[in-house]
């Protein structure tokens, strides 16, 4: 490791700790040449996950895009941000466990809809209306009726 200050390669690790819920290791280092301290992080290199869209295009999975959809659906609803973020966390956990390189987009949409239905029906209908591309009020009413039956 090169010192970010003097660019020498001799350093020593002063402290190592797990961070990010065990997903990374934080190391405090001290340069033996200039005695300045700095921090480095060691993480497992993530294998990129690709989403297979409805039109068969592939694009990299983007957590920000998923969260944006969740935030819009939950807008002005009494759902804490932590609860919304938890949906994305659980989605990513499921994706890591079941998919290696590619995942169909419908898996993401259905997962988010299922979680939103458990938390808030209005947020669920908002998300479903975009995800399922409701074309008219008839589609919308059909979804509302299915909610009332549950």
Image (cartoon, grey):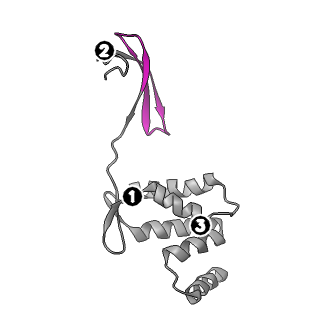
Left or right: 108, with 140 as reference point: left
Neighbour class for label 2 at 10 Å: few (<14), some, many (≥20)?
Answer: few
Q: Is residue 19 left or right of residue 140?
A: left
Neighbourhood count class around disc 1 (C-alpha, 10 Å): few under 14, some 14–19, many 20 upward: some
From the viewer's perspective, is residue 15 above or below residue 73?
above
Most extreme residue toward the bottom is 138
Q: Residue at x 46, y 55 (%)?
A: 63
Q: Are marks 2 and 3 in contact (CB under 8 Å)?
A: no
Q: Position of residue 120 (x, y in %)?
A: 65, 67
Would you place residue 141 above or below residue 124 in this image?
Answer: below
On screen, 62 above or below 73? above
What is the magenta range? 14-39
CA distance for labels 2 and 3: 52 Å
Tell me the element at label 1: loop
Residue drawn at point x = 66 percent, y = 55 percent: 80
SS at badge 3: helix
Q: Which mark is residue 73?
A: 3
According to the picture, the residue beneath numbered tag 1 turns out to be 61
Label disc, if present, on residue 10 of the rendered structure: 2
Q: Is residue 10 left or right of residue 78?
A: left
Q: Residue at x 65, y 83 (%)?
A: 149
- Determine whether the residue tagged by mark 2 lies in a helix, strand or loop: loop
Q: Earlier in the sequence, mark 2 or mark 1?
A: 2
For the stretch drawn in magenta, the main secondary structure is strand
Q: Give the percent coordinates (x, y) of residue 1.
A: 31, 23
Q: How many marks?
A: 3
Q: Disc 2 versus disc 1: distance between alpha carbons?
A: 38 Å
From the viewer's side, name the closer residue of 5 and 13. Answer: 5
Res. 57 image quadrant: bottom left
């Amino acid at each position: 490791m090169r010192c970010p200050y003097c660019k020498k390669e001799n350093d020593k690790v002063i402290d190592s700790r797990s961070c990010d819920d065990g997903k990374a290791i934080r190391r405090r280092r001290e340069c033996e040449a200039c005695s300045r301290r700095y921090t480095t992080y060691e993480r497992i290199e993530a294998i990129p996950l690709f989403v297979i869209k409805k039109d068969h295009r592939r694009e990299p999975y983007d957590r920000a895009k998923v969260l944006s959809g969740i935030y819009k659906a939950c807008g002005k609803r009494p759902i804490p941000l932590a609860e919304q973020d938890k949906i994305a966390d659980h989605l990513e956990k499921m994706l890591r466990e079941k998919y290696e390189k590619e995942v169909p987009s419908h898996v993401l949409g259905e997962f988010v809809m299922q979680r939103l239905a458990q938390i808030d029906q209005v947020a669920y209908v908002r998300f479903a209306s975009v995800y399922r591309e409701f074309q008219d009020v008839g589609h919308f009413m059909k979804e509302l009726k299915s909610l009332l039956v549950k």
